[in-house]
């Protein structure tokens, strides 16, 4: 069965009269006689009846509310467990990423050491080649023989370095294997390296165009890739509470204090445009779980019903008692408003339940305006019967007999 409150269209704190009125209106609108072309009219009419059967009985209503709260608590607990599991998985992924980064650092240190060793060997070879091409002029300044000039044939200094250098693709493939993810990361790092070489190519340096990424550039690019695939920390589930507010608090847009289940007090700001049943989200004051962002508190406002005023959206309703003669003839009177007495004109022939509207005296709408004050006229009789009025009413009902 669906939620009976949703079926009847009433709030969860609705009283018996509101529920009964909503049931009558709903039953009339979905009655099969009024919807002969609708094949589901009978089912909807029966559903409305079952919803009213639950809500009109205080014991059944209380039992349903308890079951609903238990179901919501189980759902919240299941959500918390799922998010905790997601947080553990994220922590495991971060641990693996950290281990991979440490392996990369070790590999880079090893590659850097090999590169330095190769550079030293190259420099030694170049110095040997230069010393062999310069013969000592000990025979009176004679030039060396051409054969002696052709003897030294030192190897190219670039050869040892070319054998030792590794590209970013080789490093990533050697560490992570030949998986598609590793190949994609290597390709992205290669593109980053090419992007940093564009400026050097514009200056005309042909040697720099084939330069591989250095250790610092390589690890910076790889860490950026690893961080990019990590999901952001999961957020803890929200806490849902109810808070009772007065109409004066909504008019003055002040903050109220709400108490959580753990005993903490939080401040709930009441901005304009809020009324009964609206929610206010207080960020960063909810559940605090390890490895997760702190959740929020969602506060549902319950406007306090007083003897004089009742919130209806952004409007405020009140009742104005009027005597019979004033209802028939009209009068000038005053009505008590949330901010003090307000002058009001009661038109002639105003019956009970007639609504008189006073604009701009309701709740703030958040845009500089306000709702209205709705005054419901209620005709009252005198405390003691009046014979003349009684005779007049009898004459109007039964007519004049001679």
Image (spheres, rainbow, N blue to C red):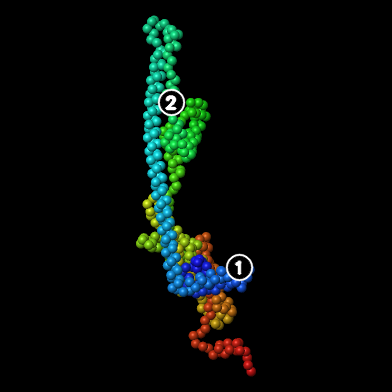
Q: Which of 170 and 199 lies nearest the eye of the viewer? A: 170
| Mark 2 neighbour class, 10 Å CA radius: few under 14, some 14 to 19, many 20 or more | few
Task: Work out whether residue 181 or residue 302 is closer to the camera in this orientation and state it.
Answer: 181
The residue under the point 47% across, 61% down is 279
| Quadrant of the image occupied by residue 100 | top left
Which residue is under mark 1? 39
Count of numbered circles on the image: 2
Q: Is residue 328 above or below residue 239?
A: below
Residue in the foreground of this view, choosing between 38 and 143:
38
Of helix, strand and loop, which one carries label 1?
A: loop
**Which quadrant: the C terminus?**
bottom right
Classify residue 82 by image quadrant.
bottom left
Residue 58 rendering spot, x and y as whole percentages? 45, 73
The residue positioned 53% from the left and 72% from the top of the image is 49
Can residue 246 be spotted in the picture?
Answer: no
Residue 99 at x, y percent in the picture = 38, 40
Q: Of circles 2 and 1, which is in front?
A: 1
Q: Is residue 195 left or right of residue 136?
A: right
Viewer-side residue, 75 vs 101: 75
Element type where label 2 sits in the image: helix
Q: Residue at x 48, y 37 (%)?
A: 183
User: Which residue was labeled with disc 2?
Assistant: 163
The answer to whether residue 134 shows anywhere in this view is yes
Neighbour tally class for label 1: few under 14, some 14-19, many 20 plus, Cα within 10 Å: few
Instruction: Give the spatial CA distance, label 2 vs label 1.
Output: 83 Å
Say which residue appears at 38% left-offset and 22% top-offset.
121
Residue 251, percent from left and from top: 47, 65
Residue 116's tag is none
Q: Earlier in the sequence, mark 2 or mark 1?
A: 1
Give coordinates of residue 213: x percent, y percent: 45, 32
């Amino acid at each position: 069965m669906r939620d009976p409150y949703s079926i009847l269209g009433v709030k969860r704190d609705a009283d018996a009269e509101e529920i009964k009125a909503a049931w009558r209106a709903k039953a009339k609108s979905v009655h099969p006689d009024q919807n002969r072309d609708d094949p589901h009219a009978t089912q909807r009419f029966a559903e409305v009846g079952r919803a009213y059967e639950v809500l009109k009985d205080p014991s059944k209503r209380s039992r349903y509310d308890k079951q609903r709260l238990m179901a919501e608590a189980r759902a919240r607990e299941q959500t918390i467990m799922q998010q905790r599991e997601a947080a553990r998985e994220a922590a495991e992924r971060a641990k693996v990423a950290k281990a991979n980064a440490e392996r990369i650092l070790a590999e880079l240190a090893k590659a850097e050491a090999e590169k330095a060793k190769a550079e030293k060997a190259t420099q030694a070879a170049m110095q040997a080649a230069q010393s062999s091409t310069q013969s000592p002029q000990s025979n009176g300044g004679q030039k060396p023989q051409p054969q002696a000039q052709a003897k030294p044939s030192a190897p190219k200094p670039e050869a040892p370095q070319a054998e030792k250098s590794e590209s970013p693709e080789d490093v990533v493939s050697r560490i992570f294997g030949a998986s598609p993810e590793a190949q994609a990361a290597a390709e992205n790092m290669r593109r980053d390296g090419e992007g940093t070489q564009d400026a050097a190519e514009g200056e005309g340096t042909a040697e720099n165009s084939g330069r591989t990424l250095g250790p610092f550039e390589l690890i910076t690019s790889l860490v950026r890739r690893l961080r990019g695939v990590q999901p952001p920390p999961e957020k803890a589930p929200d806490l849902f509470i109810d808070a009772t507010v007065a109409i004066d608090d909504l008019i003055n847009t002040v903050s109220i204090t709400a108490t959580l289940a753990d005993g903490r007090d939080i401040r709930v700001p009441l901005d304009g445009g809020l009324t009964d049943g609206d929610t206010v989200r207080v960020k960063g004051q909810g559940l605090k779980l390890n490895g997760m962002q702190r959740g929020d508190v969602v506060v549902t406002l319950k406007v306090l019903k007083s003897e004089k005023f009742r919130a209806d959206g952004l409007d405020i309703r009140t009742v104005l008692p009027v005597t019979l003669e004033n209802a028939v003839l009209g009068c000038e009177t005053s009505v008590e408003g949330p901010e003090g007495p307000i002058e009001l004109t009661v038109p002639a022939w105003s019956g009970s339940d007639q609504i008189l509207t006073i604009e701009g005296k309701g709740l703030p709408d958040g845009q500089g305006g306000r709702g209205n004050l709705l005054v419901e006229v209620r005709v009252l009789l005198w405390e003691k019967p009046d014979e003349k009025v009684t005779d007049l009413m009898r004459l109007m009902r039964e007519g004049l007999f001679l």
